[in-house]
Image: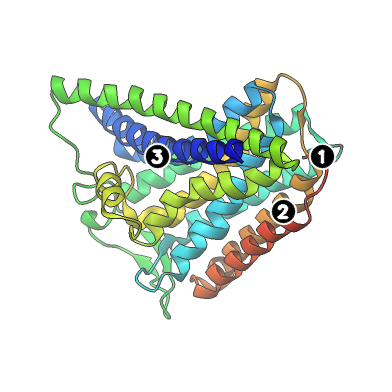
Amino acid sequence: MWVLLLTFLIYGLGLVLTAVGSRLSGRCTTWCCALCGLPMWVVGGTVVPFCLALPQLMLAFLAAGMSVTSLAVGTALAGSVANLGLALAVCLLNPRRRPSVDRQEFCRKCLLLLAACGVLMVFVRDGTLSYTGTGLLMFLFVVFVMTSIVYQHHYSYAEGSEIVTTAAAPSGLQDAGPDAYGYTAHTMAFPVMNIVNALKNLTGVIAGLALLAFGAQALVYSAATLANVTGTIQALWAATLISFGFCLPLLADALDHPFGSVWKRFATRCRYFPPQTLPMQLLNSAILNLTLALPISSLMYRRRLPFGSQFRHYDLPVCVAIALILLLPPLLRRRLYRWQGAACLALYLLYVAAALLAPLAGA
């Protein structure tokens, strides 16, 4: 009993460290990029999505390096399902928010997510991720980065976007002023650029990455220990405790920070993307989990990455179904619906129930 209690304490500590470390390193990295003169539309298309997916990337990197491949693959796939089926679903269902996305960019990213899932379905049929599949996923990552940079350039300079929301009437082509777009002073409060702030933010990047690494290490240890003590598969804990824990800060954003004033103040101070872009950032994070975390895990493992039956029969089909639910209404009806959030949440709950009640071998 004391082993389980200690393991859960380490798990909780790991979640806190990863949440704080990812936010701190993301915020300080964004400011350091601005200090180096990078345009914010470049930062928004590269650094911001990467920082949002940083906990899953770090854990997958460490787990694959330790040959704990089930946790590496499970964290990437279950993280994508949780980001879309839980955080994005809650964002769509929250009555206090009216989520909005650029229709063309949202559809492009949904198609990119479907393409990544298609590559995985084709190249993991024998139970391992082939080198061809790894290369195609890396190619999709490059496509993702290029499309994100192009979109952020148009977004930052208010070059017209077809914004779709959950409102009854589609908003159509928007031609708002520059304050309605991009990373302005209203959403990204940068400190004064001087030597002291530069050193402070560089220290924040290093400290945040160190906290993130320690937190990811604690999560790998706790998940492996729970699997060994309870006699369960590691994919079960990746699909439940780890993916849900990583999703908690995103849920706080989707629900307007109802989980405590301390986290709200920290999250607001360390914000590195405008709040209204949360739906798109969640989709970007899910794509990065598949197109970056999995190839990194494959390269770290230095062999064909094992891909268990549970990942092939549970995670991938659910991710495809959620992507289709998110894609079709904006593509065909030019708007978002609240029922999309309800459908995604229902699929997520079914996925968790299947992982808990009917786990498959080989994961």
Q: Please tell me which of labels 2 and 3 falls first in the chain.
A: 3
Q: CA distance from mark 2 to mark 3?
A: 31 Å
Please name the residue that numbered disc 3 is placed on: 48
**Which amino acid lies under the numbered mark 1 shown in the image of this protein?**
Gly
Dividing the image into 4 quarters, which one contains the N terminus? Answer: top right
Pointer 3 with pointer 1, Cβ within 8 A: no
Residue 32: x and y in percent read 28, 27
Image vertical order of residue 54 relative to residue 296, above or below: below
Q: Residue at x 71, y 55 (%)?
A: 356
Q: Residue at x 33, y 30 (%)?
A: 29
Which one is nearer the viewer's eye here, 167 or 124? 124
Q: Specify which label sits upstream in the sequence, 1 or 2.
A: 2
Question: Of callouts 3 and 1, which one flags the residue occurring earlier in the amino acid sequence?
Answer: 3
Tell me if label 2 and label 3 are in contact, CB under 8 Å. Answer: no
Tell me the distance, in whole angstroms, between the alpha carbons under discs 3 and 1.
34 Å
- Going by the numbered disc 3, the residue's amino acid type is Val
Q: Which residue is mark 1?
A: 362
Q: Residue 238: image x %, image y %?
A: 63, 43
Q: Amino acid at mark 2?
A: Ala
Residue extending farthest to the right is 126
The residue that label 2 is drawn on is 355
242 relative position to 196: left or right: right
Q: Nearer the viewer, residue 232 or 181?
A: 232
Question: Is residue 108 something one can see in this rendering?
Answer: no
Question: Is 66 left or right of 333, judged from the image as shown?
Answer: right
| Callout 3 secondary element | helix
Where residue 5 sits, quadrant-wise, is: top right
Q: Which residue is pictured at 54% across the width and 41% down the height?
A: 8
